[in-house]
Amino acid sequence: MSNTFAYAAMSPTTPLVPYQFDRREVRPSDVQIEILYCGVCHSDIHQARDEWGGSIYPMVPGHEIVGKVTAVGSAVKGFKVGDLAAVGVMVDSCRTCKNCQKEMEQYCVEGMTGTYNTYERDGKTIAQGGYASQIVTDERYVFHLSEKLDLAGAAPLLCAGITTYSPLRFAGVKKGTKVGVIGLGGLGHMGVKFAVSFGAEVTLISTSPSKAKDADRLGAHKFLLSTDPEQMKAHDSYFDVLLNTVSAPHNYEKYLSLLDMEGRMMIVGLPAEDPKVSPFALLKNRRSITGSMIGGTKETQEMLDYCAEHNIVADVEVIAMKDINEAYERMIKNDVRYRFVIDLKKN
């Protein structure tokens, strides 16, 4: 066993507090990582506060993890001590189903094992995440990270990055594709960066006029204020792809009208309330709504390599672990541009 220092939620109604626990011993296929940075995802709040139900306590959140390898198991071939490494939203899966065999483990038929707030495959050990000094993970679910990337900015790539990269790739976004990114937050700002880098014509769609300046800074070619009926009307049947990153309750139909022939709205935001959609909103232009969930091991490594090649990282504000509760409150108020990242060495 290896003693680990962390911050944990002990209940849905109390702040996160210092916590110590034991990681498992390094098994033959395991990689042990000293965590240097961990991104703070809005889903950390949802789960720590049991807003999605079924939360398991004590809970150490965090699934945007980067660090250095400190030990490897006897069967590990891809990593050595001292390597930079990363861990994302999942740490295991059944490995044998049709989806796992295609390296699309996020869609494991039995269900993937999340990095935290779940039980490991033994059904009894609580998986604990990256608000911690170290982690031990099977080599298959550990990724190589280029030294070219800013490590703090790279941490959110493990969730916000792959969550937006995967659907844009699936939708075939390329030069000339008209892409609308709905919402400019932790997910949306990554969606803009990726879509622009793929050569698309990118429009940031927001309810807030103040986001126009940042949209321009991030490389978006246009800004569409969704509360302006005239602007929305002018973009009727305009876009090939909409990347919907909004997690607040909103009207899907309002945005579906923006899709051109066979356009698709890719859903990556998770509203608390189930949206309602009239079939008539889909019939016109043969529109579709498609969900997308992070990426598998192969695609995640592909994304990280792409980011290193094109120097793409998240816009982050680095905090100390002790400031996590304040960061949660600021996130709820949308007071972050655009991702908090914990520096595990910062006091």
Image: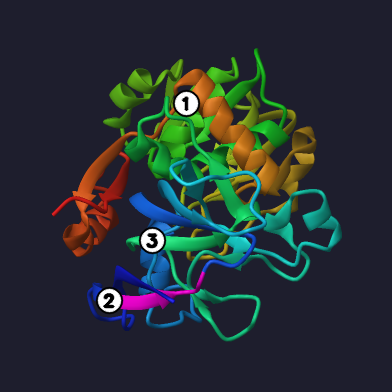
Using the image as rendered, state which of residue 14 and residue 320 is in the foreground: 320
Q: Residues within 10 Å of mark 3 (few under 14, many from 20)?
A: many
Horizontal and vertical percent for residue 51?
42, 73
Instruction: Give the mark nearer the N terminus: 1 vs 3.
Output: 3
Using the image as rendered, state which of residue 258 and residue 294 is in the foreground: 294
Callout 2 secondary element:
strand
Where are the magenta residues, as a range? 20-25
Callout 3 secondary element:
strand
Horizontal and vertical percent for residue 59?
39, 76
Residue receiving disc 2: 19
Q: Amino acid at mark 1?
A: Lys
Label 2 and label 1: CA atoms lie apart by: 36 Å
Residue lying farthest to the right in this orientation: 98
Residue receiving disc 1: 193
Is residue 96 toward the left or the right of residue 77 in the image? right
Q: Which one is closest to the eye, mark 1 or mark 3?
A: 3
The quadrant in which the C terminus is found is bottom left
Q: Are marks 2 and 3 in contact (CB under 8 Å)?
A: no
Callout 1 secondary element:
helix
Instruction: Give the mark nearer the N terminus: 2 vs 3.
Output: 2
- Is residue 235 inside the magenta stretch? no
- Is residue 24 inside the magenta stretch? yes
Q: Is residue 243 visible?
A: yes
Horizontal and vertical percent for residue 205?
45, 32
Q: Residues within 10 Å of mark 2 (few under 14, many from 20)?
A: some
What's the magenta bit mostly, secondary-structure-wise? Answer: strand
